[in-house]
Image (cartoon, rainbow, N blue to C red):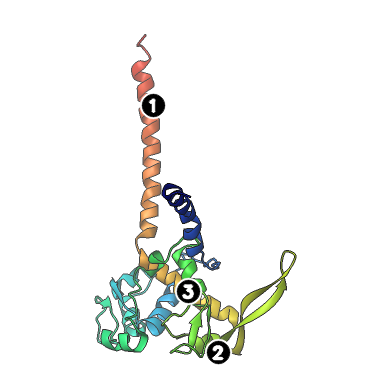
C-alpha cells in the first residue's frame, strides 16, 4: 500500500477510534423539575451541607435563593454557616493548596457543572444524578472510593453515610449466544437512608445544581413563549394588511 493509501485508510479509521474513545456509561435520567420549589430548596440545603465544604459556587449569590421562595432570614438561618452575608457569593473556605495536596487537584467550582457535564450520552443533570449514585468501595484508591461513571475519581464519597457502602461485583449472564461478564453495583452496608430516600436526596441536589447553572432558564423560556405569541399576532395582522393593500391592485 502506498503512502496515499495508508493516509486514506488512517482517515477512515478516525471516526471509529473517536467513537470508541467517547463511549460512555449509560446514564440514568435525572428527575429534574425546575418548577418544584420544595425540591430546589431541599437541593440548596444539601448543596450547602455536603458540597460547599470543598466545592464553591463562585458565580452564585445566597440572595438569589429568594427566587426559590426563601426569605433572607430563612437563608441566613438555614443556609449560611460562615461569616458570609446573604448578598455574598457562595464560596468555600478550603485552601486550594490543601485541596491539591489532599485530592490531587482543587475541587472544581460547581456553578455551571450541570451544563459542563452535558454530552451525547445525556444531559449534565443525568451525568450528575448517575455519578452521585455510583460510588463503590475500592481499597486501591487513596480515598478508598471509586466510581463507575468517573473511574479513578479523586473525590471521596461524601454521602456514603446516607447511601451506605456499595461494592462492584462481576456477574456472568447469558449474552447473544455466549455468556458475558457484567459489572454491577451492590449495596453491601446500608446507610442511614433507604435507597429510594437517597435517590430522592440526590435528585433534589441535582435539581438545584441544574437550576444554579442557569437560574434565568425559566424566565428565558417564558419570555420566548411571549415572543412567539407576539410574532404570531403580528403575522396575522401583517397578512390582513397585505390583503387589504393588494385587493384593488390588478
Q: Name the residue located 39 percent from the left edge and 53 percent from the top edge.
A: 222
Q: Residues within 10 Å of mark 1 (few under 14, many from 20)?
A: few
Is mark 3 in CB contact (under 8 Å) with mark 1? Answer: no
- Crowd rating for badge 3 (residues with CA inside 10 Å; few <14, some 14–19, many 20+): many
* Residue 38 seen anywhere in this rendered image of the structure: no
Q: Position of residue 88 (x, y in %)?
A: 24, 77
- Residue at 24% across, 75% down: 87
Q: Taking 143 as reference, is 11 above or below it?
A: above
Q: Which residue in the rendered view is the most extreme toward the front?
A: 2
Q: State the mark number for residue 175.
A: none
Say which of marks 2 and 1 sits in front: 2
- According to the picture, the residue beneath numbered tag 1 turns out to be 239
Assign a secondary structure to mark 1: helix
Query: Looking at the image, is 212 positioned above or below residue 97?
Result: above
Q: Nearer the viewer, residue 159 or 228?
A: 159
Residue 80, how many percent across, how many down? 31, 83
Q: Which residue is mark 3?
A: 204
Left or right of 182? Residue 153 is left
Q: Secondary structure at mark 2?
A: loop
The answer to whether any part of residue 124 appears in the image is yes
The residue shown at (59%, 89%) is: 190
Q: Is residue 2 above or below residue 248?
A: below
Q: Sequence order check: which comes first, mark 3 or mark 1?
A: 3
Q: Is residue 172 above or below residue 192?
A: above
Q: How far is disc 2 from disc 3 in space, using C-alphas?
A: 17 Å
| Residue 43 occupies quadrant | bottom left
Tell me the CA gap for discs 2 and 1: 65 Å
**Crowding at label 2, few (<14), some or many (≥20) Cα neighbours within 10 Å?**
few
Where does the image place residue 250, in percent across and percent down from the top left?
37, 8
Which residue lies under the disc numbered 2? 192
Amino acid at each position: 500500500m502506498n503512502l496515499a493509501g495508508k493516509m486514506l485508510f488512517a482517515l477512515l479509521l478516525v471516526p471509529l477510534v473517536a467513537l470508541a474513545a467517547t463511549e460512555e456509561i449509560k446514564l440514568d435520567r435525572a428527575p429534574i423539575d425546575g418548577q418544584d420549589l420544595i425540591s430546589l430548596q431541599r437541593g440548596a440545603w444539601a448543596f450547602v451541607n455536603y458540597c460547599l465544604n470543598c466545592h464553591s459556587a463562585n458565580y452564585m449569590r445566597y440572595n438569589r435563593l429568594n427566587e426559590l421562595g426563601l426569605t433572607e432570614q430563612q437563608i441566613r438561618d438555614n443556609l449560611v454557616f460562615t461569616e458570609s452575608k446573604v448578598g455574598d457569593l457562595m464560596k468555600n473556605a478550603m485552601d486550594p493548596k490543601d485541596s491539591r495536596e489532599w485530592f490531587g487537584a482543587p475541587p472544581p467550582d460547581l456553578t455551571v457543572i450541570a451544563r459542563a457535564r452535558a454530552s451525547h450520552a445525556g444531559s449534565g443533570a443525568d451525568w450528575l444524578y448517575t455519578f452521585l449514585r455510583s460510588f463503590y468501595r475500592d481499597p486501591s484508591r487513596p480515598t478508598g472510593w471509586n466510581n463507575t461513571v468517573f473511574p479513578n475519581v479523586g473525590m471521596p464519597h461524601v454521602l456514603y453515610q446516607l447511601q451506605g457502602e456499595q461494592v462492584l461485583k462481576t456477574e456472568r449472564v447469558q449474552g447473544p449466544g455466549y455468556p458475558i461478564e457484567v459489572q454491577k453495583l451492590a449495596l453491601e452496608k446500608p446507610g442511614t437512608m433507604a435507597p429510594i430516600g437517597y435517590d430522592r436526596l440526590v435528585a433534589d441536589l441535582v435539581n438545584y445544581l441544574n437550576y444554579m447553572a442557569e437560574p434565568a432558564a425559566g424566565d428565558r423560556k417564558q419570555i420566548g413563549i411571549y415572543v412567539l405569541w407576539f410574532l404570531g399576532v403580528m403575522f396575522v395582522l401583517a397578512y390582513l394588511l397585505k390583503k387589504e393593500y393588494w385587493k384593488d391592485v390588478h
